[in-house]
Amino acid sequence: MKPLLVAATLLALAAPVAIAAPATAAPAAATCASPATSNPKTCAQAVSWAKAHVGVTSSDYNHRCDHVVALAYGRSASGHASAAAHWNAMPSAYKHSGTTVPAGGLAFFSIPGSTYGHVMISIGSGKFVSNDIVSAGKLSETTIATIESKWSGHYLGWSNPWF
């Protein structure tokens, strides 16, 4: 047989070859980034502040979750009357769904029977620093599930640090 005929015969007998679809990029991992409202502290510095204050009890933290996350970012106040007001005032570009909150991101909740809501700061790996979950005015490590079960909180989503 001639070489060309052999090649054509082999191609005809071969199994169909699948053509792979072009590769698509995986979605980018969520990251914390300070938006145009410049914060005195970076996301990493805010996380360090939050971790360093776990176990601290202060009347300044009692029922003042939005104040606590502002302190983590080096601000004396958040500029909002409550966590609920903070969430409602925030531009949608800074609001995200999903429970994978990057370190430094802020997780927001509505709380039944409260018009104030709740916010806490992510320290990464599904852990957060929150006030009042263990006792009044005490900062402690917690999770979204704990806020949902202990306070019947409804998780609204997370945000970049927008103040």
Image: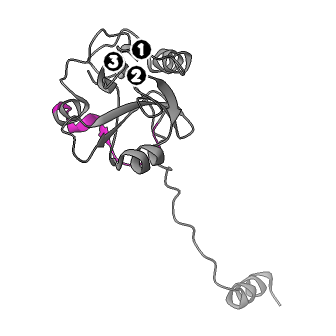
Image quadrant in which you'd find residue 6 = bottom right
Tag 3 secondary structure: helix
Question: Vertical placement of 98 versus 68: above or below?
Answer: below
Q: Amino acid at mark 2?
A: Gly
Q: Position of residue 16 (x, y in %)?
A: 64, 83
Are dots 2 and 3 in contact, CB under 8 Å?
Answer: no
Mark pair 2, 3: CA separation: 15 Å
| Disc marking residue 10 | none
Quadrant location, the C terminus: top left
| Disc marking residue 137 | 2
> Which residue, given by chain and number where applicable, does mark 1 sit on?
58
Q: Earlier in the sequence, mark 1 or mark 3?
A: 1
Question: Vertical placement of 161 versus 159: above or below?
Answer: above
Q: Crowdedness of circle 1 by 10 Å Cα count: few (<14), some, many (20+)?
A: few
Question: Vertical placement of 128 versus 80: above or below?
Answer: below
Q: Position of residue 20 (x, y in %)?
A: 57, 67
Q: Earlier in the sequence, mark 2 or mark 3?
A: 3
Tag 1 secondary structure: loop
Furthest-front residue in this view: 135
> Which residue, given by chain and number where applicable, does mark 3 sit on?
70
Are dots 1 and 2 in contact, CB under 8 Å?
Answer: yes
Q: Earlier in the sequence, mark 1 or mark 2?
A: 1
Q: 27 or 45, which is in the foreground?
A: 45
Mark pair 1, 3: CA separation: 15 Å
